[in-house]
Amino acid sequence: MCPFISLSAGGVTLIITTYNLMMLLAFCSVVGYGWARRERMLLSGDNFWGLITAVAAGGMAGAKLFYIVNSWAELGPGLSDKLSSVMRLSRGWGFYGGLAGASAAAAYFLSRNKIPVRRTADLFAPAAALGGAIMRLGCFSAGCCYGRITGVPWAVSFPRIFSRIPEQLQGIPLHPTQLYESLGNLALFGALHFLTRKYDKVRRPPGSLFLGYVCGYSALRFFVEFFRAQGAGYAGGLTGGQKISVIAVLAAAALFAGNYRGLKNGGPE
């Protein structure tokens, strides 16, 4: 666990947070995976970079907006404090907001350029899971999204240098919820990557793999929420993350049913 990386050269020291480094690595992994499949997604080089720009901009805007809406009261006493907290790159990102923003921006870009939206979403779905797996390693390095106190053999404890861990939990064994999500996303990536290898040889409703990603991640998040410290106060109920996960699964299931009916009625595959 290393929250900062220090690089020194010529008397100059550069300190990089591991969280930001993992975010950059996740982005590069998504871009690299998509670039290798751009022809299957019917994308030219220019359209590919346009799509990446749209996804990045929409994802960041959605993630920040989601964070602001859900955490406004906790961002600080004054407006300047709140704005300062929002502008930090090392915090303030809501995954579901980022997913919604990136999806909306991508759909708009693809539709405007007359590129099949659902096919592109299907073939890009594994990249989203791969990026999520790497991003959660960044959360682990920063100590955010931490788990509840536990005595399981694989528990982890965070030292004082992890500022995102409350003082009362520093040095105490916790569930490594960040790693749970990372491993779950990695498994989801493997499954989706396998399914997309024969994408054009299997008759299925268009958009089904992307909707499968949404359902798969939402189920994973629903499960992990039971072990996250932030969800510890919902006795007998659901956490905010679990409620959104349920909504996401129901919405994805409804869209899948509509796509399936369209396929049976002779609609586009």
Image: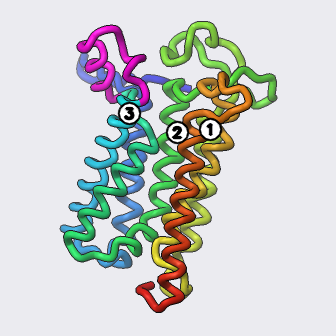
**Mark 1: few/some/many CA within 10 Å (<14, 14-19, 20+):** some
74 is higher (above) or lower (below) than 213 = above
Residue at mark 1 to residue at mark 3: CA–CA distance: 17 Å
How far apart marks 1 and 2 lie (CA) works out to: 7 Å
**Residue 133 percent across, percent down from the top left:** 53, 47
For the residue pair 145 and 156, the one nearer the viewer reads as 145
Q: Secondary structure at mark 2?
A: helix
Residue at which label 2 appears: 136
Whether the magenta-drawn stretch holds residue 172 is answered as: no
Residue nearest the viewer, comparing 135 with 13: 135
Residue 18 rendering spot, x and y as whole percentages: 43, 30
Query: What's the residue at 66%, 27% (across, down)?
Result: 234
Q: Which residues are magenta?
A: 70-89
Of the numbered discs 2 and 3, the one sitting upstream in the chain is 3
**Which residue is identified by label 3?**
20
Label 1 belongs to which residue? 179
Q: Residue flagged by tag 3: what amino acid is it? A: Asn
Quick one: SS at disc 3? helix
The magenta stretch spans residue 83: yes
SS of the residue under disc 1: helix
The quadrant the N terminus occupies is top right
- Identify residue type, mark 1: Leu
Q: Who comes first in sequence, dot 1 or dot 2?
A: 2
- Amino acid under disc 2: Arg
The disc placed on residue 105 is none
Horizontal side of residue 70 vs 64, given as left or right = right
**Where is the C terminus found, in terms of image quarters?**
bottom left
Residue 41 in picture, x, y percent from top left: 35, 75
